[in-house]
Amino acid sequence: MKTLLASALALAALAPAVAFAGPFRVGERVLIGNTHDTGTVIEIGQQLADGGTMIKVHLDRLGLGFPTVGSWYDTKVSQVTVTGTAGSHVGAPAGAPASPARQPVMTAPMLPPPPTLASPPAGAAPSAAFCQQLIRANYPPGGADQRITVNFLAFQMGGAQAHEAVYANDPNGRGHQVRAWPIHARYTVLTHYADPNADDQLRTYDANYLCYKLPVGGWVVEMTSRAPGGETAQYIHKTR
């Protein structure tokens, strides 16, 4: 299996924000197709192996307070589309489905992050905990105004298999043979907002990955497919 990648695709700490990456710009209005939320792009992250871009969006439902608070989205997986420039829309665009009903539920536990694991030595197989660490690194923990917690619900890891890693800038379309470990992971990403009036968001993901070491560089986990309905969102009311 051939997959376009570059060393920047490693699911590690998100790249510093830039004014423009791919078709998205800071300040643009967007629609999150999977959840029907609308908002404004406030930060651009890394390009991903699936062809999408990680962007941070301040959702309209959070209101005008804490304008730097937002959620990260893979633009391809979450079906993000640009609807206009900042200030060009208020609320959802005409014809967009209503946001999912927000029912009061018990707040998900805020688990402390696990200790950081060192990369496996040369030739060694990665542990499940190390591959979870690579997936978790794609969701920055947040700051004073929000906190993000990743919790794995299911995690199955298979034996090593051959995989051809093809670099995006390789004109011949040939890459390097690597050993890759297939993964099926189901996990939640809880975004807890400091604003007492802002509902927290709990997103559940169900996807398949390959974990492998680049011939030159570090380890990556590459998403290869997502289960049907593999991204869902739930809104959590704070107790007032």
Image: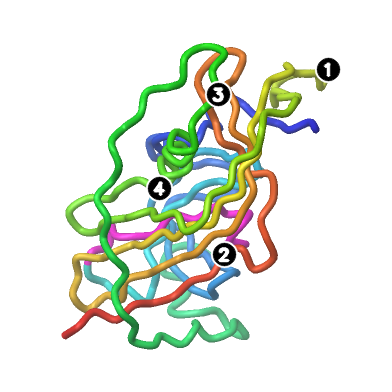
Look at the numbered disc 3 and give the secondary structure of its residue.
Answer: loop
Task: Looking at the image, tell me whether mark 2 or mark 3 is earlier in sequence order.
Answer: 3
**Callout 2 environment at 10 Å: few (<14), some (14 to 19), or many (20+)?**
some
Residue that carries the numbered disc 4 in the rendered image: 139
Q: For the residues labelled 2 and 4, say whether their Cβ atoms are less than 8 Å apart.
A: no
Q: Give the secondary structure at mark 4.
A: loop
Which residue type carries mark 2? Glu
Could you tell me the amino acid type at mark 3?
Ala
150 vs 166, left or right, is left
10 Å neighbourhood of mark 3: few (<14), some, or many (≥20)? some
Which comes before the other along the chain, label 1 or label 3?
3
| Residues tagged 2 and 3 counted as in contact (Cβ below 8 A) | no
Mark 4 or 3: in front is: 3
Residue nearest the observer in this picture, 185 or 127: 127
In the foreground, 106 or 103 = 106
Q: Is residue 19 in sight in this rendering?
A: no
Foreground residue, 23 or 13?
A: 13
Report the residue marked by disc 1. 172
Quarter placement of the N terminus: top right
Q: Is residue 87 left or right of residue 229?
A: left
- Whether residue 40 can be seen here: yes
- Residue underneath mark 2: 231
Q: Nearer the viewer, mark 2 or mark 1?
A: 2
Q: Marks 2 and 3, Cα distance to the nearest angstrom? A: 29 Å
**10 Å neighbourhood of mark 4: few (<14), some, or many (≥20)?**
many
4 or 1: tag closer to the N-terminus: 4
Residue 13 x, y percent position in the rendering: 39, 36
The magenta span reads: 66-82
Residue 127 at what x, y percent from top left? Answer: 48, 32
Does the CB distance between marks 4 and 1 fall below 8 Å? Answer: no
Amino acid type at mark 1: Asn
